[in-house]
Image (cartoon, helix red, strand yellow):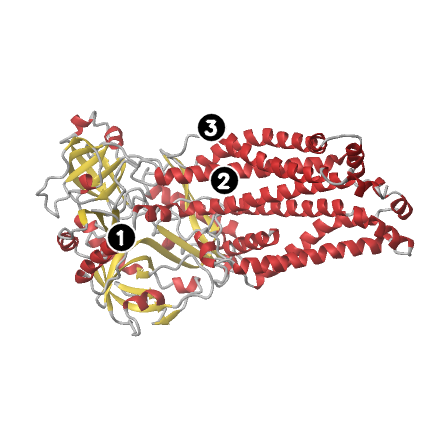
Amino acid sequence: MSMAVGLLIISIVAEAFSYDKAHPATDRLYRVTADAETKSGATRFASTALPLAAALKQFDVAEQVTRLKRGIISDASANSRTLELEGLFAEPSLFDLFAFNLQSGDKRTALTAPKSVILTTETAAKFFPGSDPIGKSIHLAQFDEDFIITGILQAPAFKTHLIKDVYVSMSTLPLLEKTEKVGRTTDNWSDFQTSYTFVRLKPGITRSDANASLSSLSDLALKQMRGQVKKFRLRLQPVTDMSPQFERLESNFGSGVSMIYLYSLMGIGLIVLLFACFNYTNLSVARSLARAREVGVRKLLGAGRLQVFIQFFMEAFLMSVMSAAAGYFIVRLINPDILAKNGVALQLDAGTLTYFAVFTILVAILAGTLPAWILSSFKPLETLKNLKGVMFFRGLTLRKILITVQLTVSLVLVSMLAVIYMQDRHMFTANYGFSRQQFIHLPLNGTDYKKLNARLSHDNHVRQITAGSALLGTYVQNYAKASVTASAEPVKLAYYAVDTNFVKTMGLTLVAGTGFPANVRDTADSYIILNEKAVEALKLGDAGNALGQLLSLQENDNKQLSSAVRKEMRVVGILKDFQYENMMREMGPMAFRYIPSQFQYASIQLQGKADAATIASLQADWRVLNPHTPWSYSTFDEEFEHVYKNTSSIETLAFFSLLTLLLACLGIFGITVYTAQTRAAEISIRKVLGAGVASITLLLTRNLISLLALSGMIALPVSYLAGNALLRNFANRIRFSATLLAMPLLLVLVVVLAAVIAQTMRTAMANPVKNLRTE
């Protein structure tokens, strides 16, 4: 089992380090990052402004530069099909820096003309199954524009974080800016949170040389931002460091797992390895009494210590190899879907298996050296004459220390499992402040919401239907800046575009106002509903005083807060604060706006459960309106599982934590077996002299009981500190106390103690005659 765990951990780590390693001249390929200090503090961003690339080309350090810009999350329609796509703005130099190839189209010109796009092979197959899409058009609802398909991106043979559904030519941006469909970004140094600059340095140019050039560019960028940022510094990050994440970067995309997670995983893997090796050593020594006479005979017949050492070491080596083979087959038997659900990507390629072979040899060395050394050190005459007098560890001090460490580490890890489980249950069962029962959510994917509403409202299974730009309790996708006057200090405001009946349907509470007017026009967007935190942040006084006030709203797409379009909004309602985002995020100022063009989901409250008949009825209604668009739906619980899937990495650690506990129990079992064998004659004499099973059991277990107690006393404060540190990742978390931790720790200690006593009682109840007849 330990070898299977070792293989799993090696596979996870190898997979995390395998991304974006196959590009040309990877050792000279970098992403430009930015360190920015504002009034709210210092932050490091993975992103940079679009004008940086042109400025960077003026320095004699860059061989090639390319830019990517995120912000494309749109319903796309083509060939009577509608799907939601995620994409990037890109330019032709993308293919000069990265090892991407086109299945169809010319990569030199595919991203040259405005309003041209490249689709991945998977995306193209969804829209145009069995046909060539080159030259055909696709409509992106986000921009309300038709685009010409000029290339089909071939799926790369290597792993990369840079693959999206669609790539739109960077030359399209100026056209979209002129029509105010996106904010001003192409020449805006202040918008450095949505674009990414990649550079390949010239041969012979070092990273430090390039960073020196970036220093003057940092000064230029800071001057262009005109006081919006206090300090600004550009730096290079190797593309190979994007995965895993060696440091946390804001506005990141395409990032792998964090190094903290990998270090934790490798640390637990090392613990599992050491525990397994120690247990093997422990059990080998405990069982060696039966082989001590064999060693004596071999030495009398002429075997040297080295020969005996090699014999026992080879036994350990063969055991390690057989365990490795068994571990490999165990891993292959595990369903990959189960591993993927728990955040584990299994990669059993030649490189991983090579690392596993080295790991197997290391295990053999660690596990086999000490038993072989001890067994080969027996003196033949002493061994044959007095088998019971052979001593392995004087006072067993080392063994006691290792057992205490094993148990302490295992108890801490198990207590973390308890904390994770309780926090996980809290995230799914806590009161978010809105209704979650009997709801299903339909991605609109370009569907006319009014027509869908009209049709589903007549379905007997439907109680109410509403719509929004995102689902509550997950993520906020839209932001704006709001102020009481245009000259006042703006407040960053998260907002949802929602239907007029959204507040009522979702069971939200208005502490003031009545919400959107019933006859509001679709294009009005002049009313706003705030939560209590927004009222406080905007200094509007109490809820009653905030009603009717006008706000100046500065907004744009995709968090580009500096590229502004101002609107005057009237406050028509104040919401009681609720958990509008997931529990890992702190709740802040939030608003609802009525913008039907931004609706992405229809939320349907059913009359009863979402049984087969209900779903079939709703699907039939959907098919009437959307015969070519796939039907899909989700519940709040399913959406929450998707949102909190990142905690699955912690669940993976929890699995390995339970394994360390199992190995610690095996270690204690080894101690118990060793103690029983070495004291077999003493136990038999005590029984003959009248000692009972209870007194003998206490005699044999009192040292272990003291070790268990010591481990518990050490583990409790350590677990408390570690648990609090873990929960700081969640803005909304469980109430945590030492008492809460004591229960799982006590349960584990009782189970371990029961197993030890059971084994000891078995020894104490043995027939003394069997042991004394050979003394």
Left or right of residue 767: residue 75: left
The residue at the point 25 percent across, 40 percent down is 435
> Marks 2 and 1: CB-CB under 8 Å?
no
Look at mark 2 in the image and give the residue it sits on: 417
**Which x, y percent locates residue 299?**
89, 53
Q: Residue furthest left?
A: 519
**Which x, y percent locates residue 278?**
68, 45
Query: Sequence order check: which comes first, mark 2 or mark 1?
Result: 2
Which mark's residue is nearer the viewer, 2 or 1? 1
Left or right of residue 705: residue 441: left
* Quadrant hosting residue 529: top left
Give the tally of numbered discs. Answer: 3
Report helix, strand or loop for mark 1: loop
Report helix, strand or loop for mark 3: loop
The one nearer the camera, 81 or 626, is: 626
Query: Sequence order check: which comes first, mark 3 or mark 2?
Result: 2
Look at mark 1 in the image and give the residue it sits on: 611
